Image (spheres, helix red, strand yellow):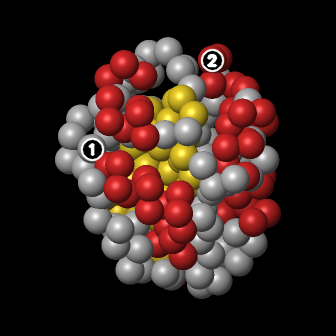
Amino acid sequence: MDSFRRCMRVGGLALFPSDTVYGLATEPDSEEGVHRLNALKGRNPDRPAAVMFFSLDLALATLRELGPRTRAALERLLPGPYTLLVPNPARRYPLACGGEPERLGLRVPALEGALAPLAAASEPVLQSSANRSGAADARRLADVDWAIRRGVDLQIDGGELPGTASTVVDLTQYELGAGYRILRQGAASVAAVEARLLA
């Protein structure tokens, strides 16, 4: 996936497959890239996005300020079809945080089969689903709105994906013993989250 890495390094915008649905990705600190992503989606720039790492080890090494209980939760849930909201006391990746700089959305997809080459991506990306704001998620590259496809610098066809967005789990108070909240049930069920966190 050299083309994907090169696209990210220059602040480009890529349309790519994940373990759930097709997404848009750009370099997390590229104001131009994030502006283009939001404009293509018709998305409010104040809404937070997620930062996707292609390796759990890299995510844990980068977010070294996370407490031991939160880190253990990440190790139980990731990689997989989850977006985890975690504390962000270091205020990393501000362009992904919208109006909540001390909270970060985190993704580490399960990269198997046709998606395995993405594991070579050594840097995180800011990502959002590849659909107009409020529209259905894309299971196939052909399902992505043509205006979005025309507006990106790179398209990667990963074939047909599961088509259900990630499950969003709020872990921002988990370190303090306050448990977790499921903000959106998606590809992973409530029972799956509970089973992994209580394992």
**Category of crowding for the residue at label 1, using alpha-carbon neighbours closer than 10 angstroms: few (below 14), some (14–19), many (at least 20):** some
Which sits earlier in the primary sequence, circle 1 or circle 2? 2
Marking on residue 110: none
Q: How many marks?
A: 2
Q: In the figure, is residue 160 to the left or right of 113?
A: left
Q: Name which residue type carries label 1.
A: Arg
When the figure is inspected, residue 197 is found, relative to residue 61, above or below; the finding is above
Label 1, secondary structure: give it: loop
Mark 1 to mark 2: distance in Å?
25 Å
Residue 83 position in % (x across, y down): 47, 52
The three-letter code of the residue at mark 2 reads Ala
- Pointer 2 residue: 114
Query: On the picture, is 1 further left or further right than 163?
Result: right
The residue shown at (75%, 72%) is 64
User: 172 or 190: nearer the eye?
Assistant: 172
Q: Dot 2 lies on which element?
A: helix
Q: Is residue 190 above or below residue 69?
A: above
Q: Position of residue 73 (x, y in %)?
A: 59, 58
Where is residue 90, by image quadrant? bottom right
- Residue highlighted by disc 1: 132
* Residue situated in front as seen by the camera: 144 or 192: 144
Quadrant where the N terminus sits is top right
Q: Is residue 142 above or below residue 71?
A: above
Q: Residue at x 47, y 72 (%)?
A: 97
Q: Residue at x 74, y 43 (%)?
A: 6
